[in-house]
Amino acid sequence: MRDLAHFQPRWMSFALCLVAASLPLLISQHPNFMNLAILVGIYYSVCIGLSLIFGIGGQLSLAQAAFYGIGAYTSALLSTKLGLPVFLSFAAAAVASGVIGWVLAAPILRLRTVYLAMATLAFGEILVTLIRENREITGGSTGIINLPTPTLGAFSFDTPVRYYYLVWTFALLAAWIAHNIIKSRVGAGLRAISDSEIGAASCGVDVVRYKTWMFVLGAIFAGVAGALYVHYLSFISPDSYSANFSILMVMILAIGGRTSLIGAFLGAVIVTTLPVALAGYDAYSPLLFSILFLAAVMFLPDGIAGAARSSLIDTGWSRKWRSGKEFNQ
Amino acid sequence: MRPPTNSAEEQPMSSSTILQFLFSGLTSGALYAFVALGFSVTYSSSGVVNFAQGQFVMLGGLVAASLNTLFDLPVLPSMLLGTAAAALTGLVVGRVFILPILKLGEFRLILVTLGISLFLEAIALLIWGTDPWALPSLLDLEPFRIGGASLSSDSVLIIVMTFTTLAGFTAFVRYTRWGRAMRATSIDRTVASSLGVNVPLTIVLAFVLSAVFGGVAGALLTPLIATGSQVGMLMTLKGFTAAVLGGISSPMGAVIGGFLLGVIEAFAGGFISSAYQNAIGLAILILLLMFRPEGLFTLTTRRA
Amino acid sequence: MILEVQEIGRRYGGVVAVNDVSFTAKEGSITALIGPNGAGKTTTLSIISGMTPPSSGRTLLEGADITGLRADQICRRGMARTFQTPQTFSSMSVLENVVVGTTPLGRISLLGVGLRLPHIAQQEQKLREEAQTWLDLVGVRGLSHEPLGKLSFGTLRLVELARALASHPKIILMDEPASGLSRAETQNLRQVLLRIRDRGTSILLVEHNMPLVMSTADHVYVLDKGKLLAGGTPGEVQTNPLVQKAYLGTAG
């Protein structure tokens, strides 16, 4: 269905994939750039799920860090303590975060706005405490080192370029799934919920079920992303999973645009490259981020992507696009 | 925030241990009560749950500590200036950020207050760094020995100040024009406005007051535990828990909630494990939100 | 009887909003619920559609008890509704609003949708095409891809109605659909209501606009102060002395 609210012409998606596929050829000589590109892919994956629940569903969940951590630790522990092949550990990470997400969803999603934010924040902090205090299992505050590299048969993802393709394959797969959902009746139902929950319910939308699905899906994406990242670093520690991470993800969507996948991508790029762009001044990056975030939240309700879209909405070109032939999905 | 306690493995259960837990609980409870009071005031008059509430504590403490440390200002003036700094911040926040966004709805408001919290923390990080800053005791008296447990003068001070503030605030709301304006605004903004109340000003006043409460708490706390630039978020969570515990719309409930939370945490930390002390407080929050969001003491369901 | 309301009651503390109200709606007919302000009409509608639980009594849809079911469950059973203030979805286009209305039809599968499984994708396509036909039925042609922001109030109401029709309901509940409409829009509404009825969908209408009610409804019930006062054909109700007293006797 052509709708400007989800303006993502095919050429844009295609171009994005092309760029993603060819980027390593340009930057593989610069290990820092490769690290950044991988990090963008990781953040993007986490934010795809958040975009469904927060951007479209309108629920401010600050639980991503928790699921990012659950996935990461599940995979790290299974691969080091039980010697499970890494890809299997990734699958386990998806299952663990999905199941915990599902259990948490029902009680937590009933909560209104602020209460939901606080509760999910609290959940994340409790998790970090649990990780820190159970040293024998989780390695405590010092973490675990020497996490194994993922392998497929004889092929090992042991170079940044290879890992880049692994991460971005996942990211684009997640994006494709999310995109399909957004464009479908389910996506429309989700948006309906955030516009008018009463209206949505009167149309037969099972509000709790929809919100739960998005929450669980977001949890799974975050969990796998977490697992992917720690096996890249070969190292895991609880510091990365505190509230700050969840807030960073919300920042990505607030700045980039919370209702579209392009917005999530834009935000991820901005947030990862800004500290680098600041070079020697990166002590100022928390300040800069908070200013960007505040400005975005006050003036750009749908981030930069949303602002760009709004300015396009009334142009003759967009009207033509919207009323054009139905493009087959 | 972890008041000094001994965990159960190290000390046998004795009445003095229990009393000691109680004293630490009351001390941290006083802190939580102040933050909760701030939440209650802003929520009642504007419907906003201010994510940045905890940062006022941080500001009060850090400004006071740095004035004393860097400029040798005596403790009392430092504390007063710390509170003033917090108040000024509250004024700016309320006037510049909250008022214009009020009509845009709850969703935007949470994000804005979150942004303000992050901004304040980021600035604090740049100015004061990550290290804690300390203040000497205000009264500089010997700690009181009661039943084998010790209670420092700073603890007594913060506990007493909580009740004084509550009493003062209640009197303010009941007997002064501005206080009554705030009360009217908290019941119904449109009606208050039609009765001639300057609602925007009242809301800004609410933010200033909540900042004062936070700042006072931060200043009084710093002699007990050095403040750092990163404490804001945890203070927000704890204060919010306390407010939910006691019922966010009632100042008295907020204070009771604060002390209750502090004491529960102290005992849980003492008997179970001090490492889990914070986690227990947070778990209380989650359980409360799931099962009794209106708090333990709210008799009527107030208009949200 | 497509709808049976049996001794529905609702109290709020000491206030009785609806008191022992019973009536029925015949299949394929337009039934109207009228009454002076504060008579409890909207509360009754709210109870029937599952948005407010009754303090007593029950509602039967095609003989099955739907009391206490959630609004979305009731919709899936075949009862749709519109609201006095249209609860349309402002972030979506007109067509998308109607597509949400198709939710109870076919299967909703997250997996099917996410992975674009062929039979699910086909279903989606069909339902989108069908959504367009509902817009044509209510007379909102050519606006399918417009965002809602610029549409008139009357058009919003029609969009909401098309959305309600999209779930193939057996009965549609409408809460004051004519309020805020111009003379021309009300005429159009009348035509639409008759069209809907003639296709076999029943309508339960809460309405203040007497000419509309009297010229459109097959059966009318009158509520006053929470109680059912009278019921009958429009003619019977109009000449009923109790009804006249209730309307004329109400101050303001």
Image: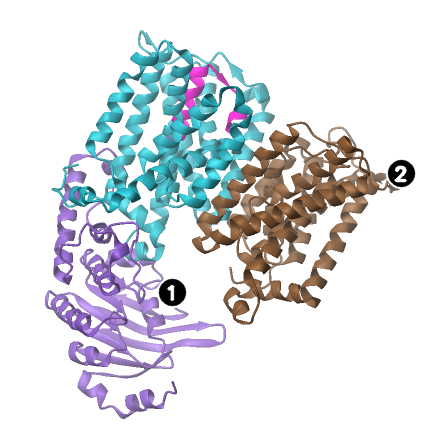
Chain colours: A cyan, B brown, C purple
Q: Which residues are magenta?
A: A220-241
Above or below for A179 versus B244: above
Res C63 seen here: no
Q: Position of residue B298 (x, y in %)?
A: 60, 60
Q: Nearer the viewer, residue B54 or B143?
A: B54
Asked whether, in this view, residue C159 is left or right of residue B84, the answer is: left
Which amino acid type is shown beneath numbered disc 1?
Thr
- In percent of the image, x 38 and y 74: which residue is there? C9
Pinpoint the chain carrying mark 1. C
Q: Could you say where residue B105 lies in the image, as x and y percent from the top left?
A: 44, 53
Q: Dot 2 corresponds to which residue?
A: B142
Amino acid type, mark 2: Glu
Neighbourhood count class around disc 2 (C-alpha, 10 Å): few under 14, some 14–19, many 20 upward: few
Picture residue at 66% right of the left edge, 48% below the top: B87
Task: Determine whether the residue tagged by mark 1 lies in a helix, strand or loop.
Answer: loop
In the image, residue B23 sits, relative to residue B205, either above or below, namely above
Residue ID at (27%, 71%): C180
Can you tell which quarter of the image residue B11 is in?
top right
Q: Mark 1, mark 2: which one is toward the viewer? A: 2
Disc 1 target residue: C52
- Please say whether residue C41 is one of the residues in the magenta stretch: no
The foreground one among C144 and A52 is C144
Q: Mostly what secondary structure, the magenta segment? A: helix
